[in-house]
Amino acid sequence: MLGKMRAAPEQGRGNLMADQDFAEAEREAGTQAAAQSATLFETAAQLLRFNIEQGHLYPSLVLQESGLSERLNMSRATVKRALAILEAEGLISKFAGRGFIVSGGIGAPRRDDLRRIFLDLEGLDEMVGKPNWLRIYEEVERTFSHSLIFGRYRIIEALLAEDFDVSRTVVRDVLGRLQERGLVHKSQTSRWVVEPLTSQRIKDKFELRTILETAALRSAKLDTAALRALVADINALDRSAVLTPATWFALEERFFRYAILSTPNQDLAESAQANRRALAACQSALFSLGLPPDSQSLAELGTVIDLALSGTVTAATSMLATHLTRARDRTIAQLKITAIIDPPSDLPRYLQRA
């Protein structure tokens, strides 16, 4: 079971702002930690489940992918996966005609116009108006992140477009953005692939992190108040409990933002951020397998902050280098555990072993 973090004691307005900042960072980090936020098809399933429970989608009503796709403004692939969840829960069943029928009815199937039925779609507000690439980005990113620790996979553009009911142009837009994050690459034959994060690649990434991030810290314009608040939050962690991935990511992200990205050298900051992304995706995938976050890693960052705030920048950069070496070793040790774990069997068809 995942533990909870003890709340830090209030220390006036400064800590209040720190709490707000921490909450904001934790919300941002939620998308990095697998299983912390719902995918688009899970959101669709939640909305449909709620409307069945409320009686808006009533017994014997016929549900078709096309009608729901139009009503929810989602792709048919997303709606299809949502309906599969509801079927497994027994809320709907396959209809002999076409589509599904809401369970619990005793009369004839009702083919009412889904566009005219009242539905409570309040939870859909944030989805409205999003461009097509953004609607599928999170789910595709999560799938790729989960697969990169299990081997090399080829991405089939046509199947990806078909599964999400979007154009190849949208798919290429998504893949291009994921390429910028280091999650996908183009092979020598111009095919999109998810390259595995091997032990050697992790070593290379951490070696580059050490070079870039120690240089950034050396030149950083530190936000003293924000870093002191971060140390207070790290020290307030319940050492006897297991951290949630969201909390771990949020605290690490705050350190990176206030200590590393505060360098005035924007090129250095951008390079450090780009290099870190693939490792963050790897860590997210490892957490999704049930491997717990390491509180010792955060304690090391707390030491780096203490040294930096005391004015001993050389000692701070040395401690940061030590932390990154230990983080590298911990990540490789976790990666070795995946060698005895079978690759996921539920990967979508657009992702095929290369």
Image (spheres, rainbow, N blue to C red):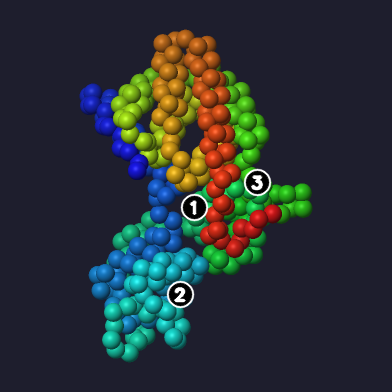
- Identify the residue at image location x=43%, y=38%: 292
Amino acid type at circle 2 is Glu
Total count of labels: 3
**Coordinates of residue 278 in the picture (x, y in percent):** 57, 40
Q: Secondary structure at mark 3?
A: loop
Residue 265 visible somewhere in the drawing? no
| Residue 176 placement, left or right of 241 | right
Quadrant in which residue 235 is drawn: top left
Earlier-in-chain disc, 1 versus 3: 1
Report the residue marked by disc 3: 195
Q: Residues within 10 Å of mark 1 (few under 14, many from 20)?
A: some
Quadrant in which residue 158 is drawn: bottom right
Amino acid type at circle 3 is Glu
Q: Nearer the viewer, mark 1 or mark 3?
A: 3
**Coordinates of residue 198 in the picture (x, y in percent):** 64, 39
**Rendered position, 342 above or below 291:** below
Earlier-in-chain disc, 2 versus 1: 2
- Residue furthest to the bottom in view is 108
Give the spatial CA distance, label 3 vs label 2: 34 Å
